[in-house]
Amino acid sequence: MGQPLRPSHLIKPKTGPEDPELAETLREGLEQVSPDDVLAIARELAGRRQYLAPLVERIAR
């Protein structure tokens, strides 16, 4: 007997950016994140990229 499906698979298929439920979920998420949080995450990701890009380049050769 296999694993039961998670409820997220049973609700409905994804319908894309026009999906009103998806839009509402994104709005709720954005209400929980401040612009300063987004900037901090962007800075952290940029720093990681700056560190990792040369390593990836060396591996890709």
Image (tube, grey):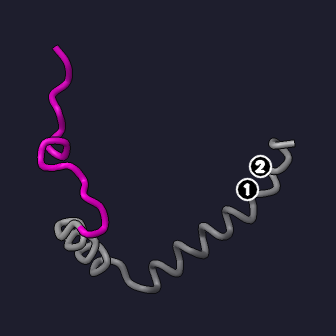
Asked if marks 2 and 1 touch (Cβ < 8 Å), the reply is yes
Residue furthest out toward the bottom? 35
Question: Residue, x 22% and y 69% (percent of image)?
Answer: 25
Instruction: Judge from the rendering whether residue 42 lies leftward or rightward of residue 28; answer left or right.
Output: right
**SS category of the residue bearing label 1:** helix
Q: Which residues are magenta?
A: 1-18
- Residue at point 12%, 48% (across, down): 11
The image quadrant that residue 26 belongs to is bottom left
User: In the image, is 7 to the left or to the right of 60?
Assistant: left
Residue 13 place in picture, x, y as percent: 20, 49
Q: Is residue 44 magenta?
A: no
In the image, 18 versus 10, the foreground residue is 18
In x, y percent, where is residue 38?
Answer: 47, 78
Three-letter amino acid code at the position of disc 1: Leu
Foreground: disc 2 or disc 1:
2
Residue marked by disc 1? 52
Instruction: Please tell me whether the stretch drawn in magenta is mainly helix, strand or loop.
Output: loop
Query: Which residue, given by chain and number where applicable, does mark 2 sit on?
Result: 56
Q: Quadrant of the C terminus?
A: top right
Instruction: Please tell me whether residue 60 is drawn above or below residue 25 in the rendered image.
Output: above
Q: Quadrant of the N terminus?
A: top left
Q: Residues within 10 Å of mark 1 (few under 14, many from 20)?
A: few
Type of the residue with mark 2 = Val
